[in-house]
Image (cartoon, grey):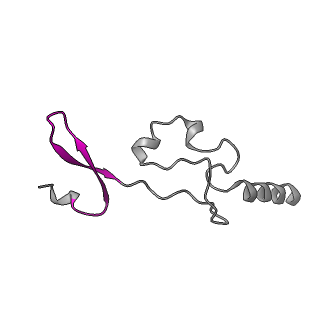
Amino acid sequence: MSAPRFRTKTFKRSLKTVPGGRKVEHYKKKKPSKHVCAKCGKVLDAVPRGRPYEIRKLSKNQRRPNRPYGGKYCTNCTKKLIKEEARSL
């Protein structure tokens, strides 16, 4: 029987065959939801989904786009923001 903490829907279950020939149920945390734009709510393409320990292993330029407001706003909202800033000067 699995430990009580694994009996919730928080964990994804997968059956694995171990070297001894037994079938064992492995538990894995679910992936977090996709990142969305803070302004329009559109899904951000270049930002990966993953648990913090998986994201930590990526290099800095793989974690988010390397541009102003990268990982916060989508490309269209970023373009509009930069234009507004330039016009306000």
Secondary structure that dominates the magenta span? strand
Residue 24 part of the magenta-drawn span: yes
Query: Is 62 situated above or below 14?
Result: above
Point out the residue furthest to the front here.
Answer: 21
Residue at image coords 45%, 36%: 57
x, y percent for residue 65: 64, 44
Camera-side residue: 41 or 2?
Answer: 2
Point out the residue furthest to the bottom here.
Answer: 40
Residue at image coords 15%, 37%: 21
Dividing the image into 4 quarters, which one contains the N terminus? bottom left
When asked about the image quadrant of residue 43, the answer is bottom right
Horizontal relation, residue 61 to residue 88: left or right: left
Dividing the image into 4 quarters, which one contains the C terminus? bottom right
Residue at image coords 48%, 59%: 33
Query: Is 54 situated above or below 19?
Result: below
x, y percent for residue 67: 70, 44
Point out the residue furthest to the left here.
Answer: 1
* Label tally: 0
x, y percent for residue 62: 57, 38
Horizontal relation, residue 55 to residue 65: left or right: left
Q: Which residues are magenta?
A: 7-29
Residue 58 part of the magenta-drawn span: no
